[in-house]
């Protein structure tokens, strides 16, 4: 794996914190390795959508990597519930189920992006970088519109 420039949060230069949601322990470990190689930190893990919702509220991660097909509650429903409670949530869908309908549904419910399994580290890195910068531009615009900092 080639070295990546560490991704950090714009506001405080701290490592980006992730919530990894997948019913496969192997997939979660694999994603955790990639996150570490990006200079990030795994704030929490979940094996289903229900746990993902509780873990999101508990850990307040910067990015959620969410599988679509899981027991108890599918990733798409979990995205909808998390975004309803936390509109600022940045969720990237990670799934081998590359059906257009699922991807579209996840994006309509509030997911910011989608990455196909098997996940390639450089692809995931670029998507996370995009989602972080996209959000920073949005947050910056709101801050500057609302107040002038000296």
Image (spheres, helix red, strand yellow):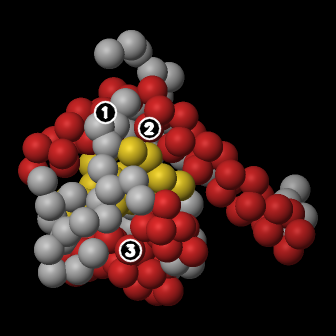
To which residue does mark 1 refer? 34
Marked residue nearer the N-terminal end (3 or 2): 3
Left/right of residue 36 with respect to residue 23 in the rendered view = right
Image x and y of residue 73, in percent:
23, 80
Q: Helix, strand, or loop for circle 2?
A: helix
Badge number at residue 124: 2
Q: Are marks 1 and 3 in contact (CB under 8 Å)?
A: no
**Residue 66: which quarter of the image?**
bottom left
**Residue 124: which quarter of the image?**
top left
Task: Work out whether residue 117 can be spotted.
Answer: yes
Marked residue nearer the N-terminal end (2 or 1): 1
Q: CA distance from mark 1 to mark 3?
A: 23 Å
**Residue 70: which quarter of the image?**
bottom left
Nearer the camera: disc 3 or disc 2: 3
On the rendered image, what quadrant is the C terminus found in?
A: bottom right
Image x and y of residue 109, in percent:
52, 77
Q: Helix, strand, or loop for circle 3?
A: helix
Marked residue nearer the N-terminal end (1 or 3): 1
To which residue does mark 3 refer? 76
Give 148 or 30, whichever is nearer the viewer: 30
Image x and y of residue 116, in percent:
39, 45
Q: Are marks 2 and 1 in contact (CB under 8 Å)?
A: yes
Q: Helix, strand, or loop for circle 1?
A: helix
């Amino acid at each position: 794996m080639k070295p990546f420039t560490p991704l950090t949060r714009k506001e405080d230069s701290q490592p980006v914190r992730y919530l990894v949601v997948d019913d496969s322990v192997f997939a979660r470990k694999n994603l955790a390795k990639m996150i570490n190689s990006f200079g990030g930190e795994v704030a929490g893990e979940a094996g289903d959508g229900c746990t993902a919702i509780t873990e999101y509220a508990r850990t307040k991660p910067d990015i959620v990597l969410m599988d679509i097909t899981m027991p108890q509650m599918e990733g798409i429903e979990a995205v909808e519930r998390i975004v309803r409670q936390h509109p600022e949530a940045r969720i990237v869908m990670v799934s081998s189920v590359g059906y257009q309908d699922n991807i579209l549904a996840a994006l309509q419910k509030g997911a910011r992006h989608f990455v196909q399994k098997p996940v390639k580290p450089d692809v995931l890195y670029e998507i996370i970088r995009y989602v972080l910068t996209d959000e920073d531009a949005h947050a910056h615009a709101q801050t500057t519109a609302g107040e002038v900092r000296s």
